[in-house]
Image (cartoon, rainbow, N blue to C red):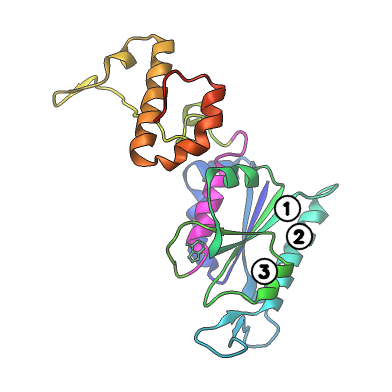
């Protein structure tokens, strides 16, 4: 899979994708992450990427030409490297976008190519929204100074779902949200610390009992912290024939 990030601040990404699990995935060729400065596609000698809004008002708007032309250059490059059609998404990071979820990350992780556009200033020319991008994503109901941190968040969430990126010990299957619920409590050694003990069932070696305990704890935690998730998780819970009512 390939991820291309279009930004005015490429230095912000230096080092971010060289570390830890994502760094290892890049090193093993499981994902190809490239960062591009779309200022290079500006048309004038001052490399202007933004301009005043038609109709007046505060702030600047990102011009269409550098965004269209940088993304088209990237897609041509991707198509040149592959035989057959490329399953791609062109995503604008913006507070006006669809709230980012594990489900969206899962969908994006199955694409051949994802282009992430980091917005800035007051926004982008509406023609970019209408004729270039395929999706708009927000990472939460707050406003950041730009789309760079959201692009890092989205890239990380996608990459760890690519087959082979997580080892068995880091498996994504038990994560919060992978089954629509929050994760159950985890413990490690020592079995007793400052008088606080690990739940007996986890030391029992009885895998069926451990699985049951984890499912119950997962439900309890979700009910306490994020009850609204239970409505969405219901079909998947029903299919697993969970005993007892969930609310
Ligand atoms: N750009 C600024 N704030 C953002 C947010 N919350 N999500 C995505 N992109 C953004």
- In the picture of the structure, the residue carrying the numbered disc 2 is 75
For label 2, the SS is helix
Is the residue under label 2 in contact with that under label 1 (CB below 8 Å)? yes
Along the horizontal axis of the image, is 157 left or right of 199? Answer: right
- Mark nearer the viewer, 1 or 3: 3
Q: Residue at x 71, y 78 (%)?
A: 65
Sooner in the amino-acid sequence: mark 1 or mark 2: 2
Specify the segment rendered in magenta: 146-164
Q: In what element is the residue under mark 1?
A: strand
Q: Are marks 2 and 3 in contact (CB under 8 Å)?
A: no
Would residue 148 be counted in the magenta stretch?
Answer: yes
Vertical placement of 64 versus 193: above or below? below
Q: Residues within 10 Å of mark 1 (few under 14, many from 20)?
A: some
Measuring from the top left, give residue 201's x and y in whole percent. Answer: 32, 14
SS for dot 3: helix
State which quadrant residue 75 falls in: bottom right
Name the residue at 67% across, 80% down: 42
Report how far apart the C-alphas of labels 2 and 3 lie in the structure: 17 Å
Look at discs 1 and 2 and give the one toward the viewer.
1
Mark number for residue 88?
A: 1
How packed mark 3 is, by other alpha carbons closer than 10 Å (few <14, some 14-19, many 20 or more), is some
Q: Which mark is residue 129?
A: 3
Residue 98 shows in the view: yes
Q: Nearer the viewer, residue 99 or 14?
A: 99
């Amino acid at each position: 899979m390939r991820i291309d990030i279009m930004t005015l601040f490429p230095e912000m990404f230096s080092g971010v994708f060289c570390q830890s699990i994502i760094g290892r995935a890049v090193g093993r060729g499981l994902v190809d992450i490239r960062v591009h400065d779309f200022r290079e596609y500006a048309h004038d000698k001052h490399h202007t990427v933004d301009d005043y809004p038609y109709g007046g008002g505060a702030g600047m708007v990102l011009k269409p030409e550098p965004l269209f032309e940088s993304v088209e250059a990237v897609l041509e490059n991707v198509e040149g490297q592959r035989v057959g059609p490329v399953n791609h998404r062109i995503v604008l990071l913006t507070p006006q976008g669809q709230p980012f979820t594990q489900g969206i990350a899962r969908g994006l992780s199955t694409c051949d190519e994802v282009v992430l556009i980091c917005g800035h200033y007051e926004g982008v020319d509406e023609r970019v929204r209408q004729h270039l991008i395929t999706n708009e994503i927000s990472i939460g109901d707050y406003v950041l100074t730009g789309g760079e941190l959201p692009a890092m968040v989205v890239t990380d969430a996608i990459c760890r779902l690519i087959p082979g990126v997580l080892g068995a010990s880091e498996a994504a299957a038990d994560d919060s949200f992978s089954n629509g619920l929050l994760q159950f409590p985890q413990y490690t050694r020592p079995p007793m610390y400052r008088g606080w003990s690990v739940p007996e069932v986890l030391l029992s070696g009885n895998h069926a009992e451990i699985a049951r305990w984890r499912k119950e704890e997962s439900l309890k935690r979700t009910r306490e912290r994020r009850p609204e998730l239970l409505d969405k998780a219901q079909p998947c819970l029903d299919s697993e024939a969970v005993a007892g009512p969930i609310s």
